[in-house]
Amino acid sequence: MAKVLEDLSNAGVAIWLDDLSRERLVSGSLKQLIKEFNVVGVTTNPSIFNSAISTSQLYKSDILQHKSDSIEEIITKLTTDDVRDACDLFRDAYDTNNQDGRVSIEVDPRFANDTKATIDQGTQLWNLIDRPNLLIKVPATLAGLPAITHLAAEGISVNVTLIFSVKRYQQVLAAYADGLEMRIAANKSISEIHSVASFFISRIDSAVDALLDENSELRGAVAISNAILAYDAFLKFELSDRWKNLKIKGSNSQRPLWASTGVKDPKYDPTRYVMQLVAKQIVNTMPENTLNAVKVNGVFLGDSITPNIGKAKQIMAKLALTGIDLDKITNELELDGVEKFEKSWIELMNSVNKILTGEQ
């Protein structure tokens, strides 16, 4: 393992891969990343599965064997089989430290604004995959917040996705705590429930940079500052009386997970959303090209978050003076994120249908 990856792990950063496919499982490439890159978890999303299933022949026989099922049922079969196999591959990591060794699967993105449908499918996926190291991904929409609470109260571990603002992140922390408190009130254990909160990084810079002058000192600074302030909110929540009481009763922290960590601007260092966001109790899920960049070119500087909280606040204050409305941007990014995942899901359904009809 490269020393920089070992340094990240020792600093408290859990390295996860933002990708999964049957090709990775069959070829052994995922197993190799576990061994050589210290990867201890996997995240998936509708776009990842669309890419995996629509470009590989490894799914074709499964699809044709279930041609009497609906397209949604076939997709559920394909994705849950891959995620279950990945959960089994990460079982050693999970048994070593049950915070990690986690694999995430997302509810149908078309349910992003439907609380009941999200709860129902989240529960279905949890029971169908039937692995303790599974995480059910739920979007941090307003409709998603009560679903987070309900699923946690039912003993289901959750990965909350599409978080762009510190305010929404604080609501996510509260929703998770609500679920744990409901479970305690029902005289049930909370020690087996885990959660991460996926805070999206690079899309913030893409949106904000487009509104800034070419020479602005704020270019490329806002996304990292936003994430640093999210981590500050996490630390403050961990120190609250509410969380201390839950900790006594066995709660597990809802760790911040940095998502969308591949740079969008080719002028930026491809490791910036990893190496500049290092602290204890962090998960960083990376596409493989970012993981490779970190291994080859990453410069480890230790904790790069807590010493920079004050600086992050200054950057956000300067942004406010420009008149750029970050709340408006993060709201738009949430809507856009849901829309992109919906589009990928529909494309996946079309790809499966083409195989069923012999067009592909």
Image (cartoon, helix red, strand yellow):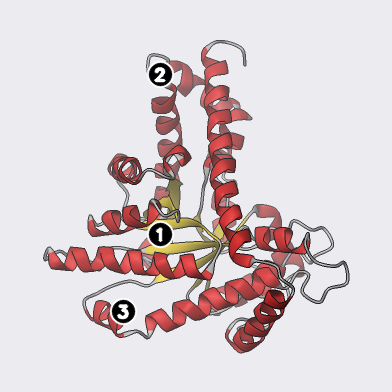
Res 6 seen here: no
Front residue of this view, candidates 65 and 214: 214
Q: Earlier in the sequence, mark 2 or mark 3?
A: 2
Residue on which disc 3 sits: 243
Residue 66, label in figure = 2
Residue 268 left/right relative to 276: right
- Labels 1 & 2 near each other (Cβ < 8 A): no
Dot 1 alpha-carbon crowd within 10 angstroms: few under 14, some 14 to 19, many 20 or more: some
Front residue of this view, candidates 109 and 68: 109
Going by the numbered disc 1, the residue's amino acid type is Asp
Q: Residue at x 38, y 14 (%)?
A: 68
Q: Position of residue 276 (x, y in %)?
A: 67, 75
Q: Quadrant of the N terminus?
A: bottom right
Q: Please give the count of numbered marks on the rendered protein.
A: 3
Q: Residue at x 54, y 66 (%)?
A: 165
Q: Is residue 68 above or below residue 158?
A: above
Q: Position of residue 216 (x, y in %)?
A: 83, 73
Residue on which disc 1 sits: 92
Regarding mark 2 in the picture, which secondary structure is present there? loop
Q: Earlier in the sequence, mark 1 or mark 2?
A: 2
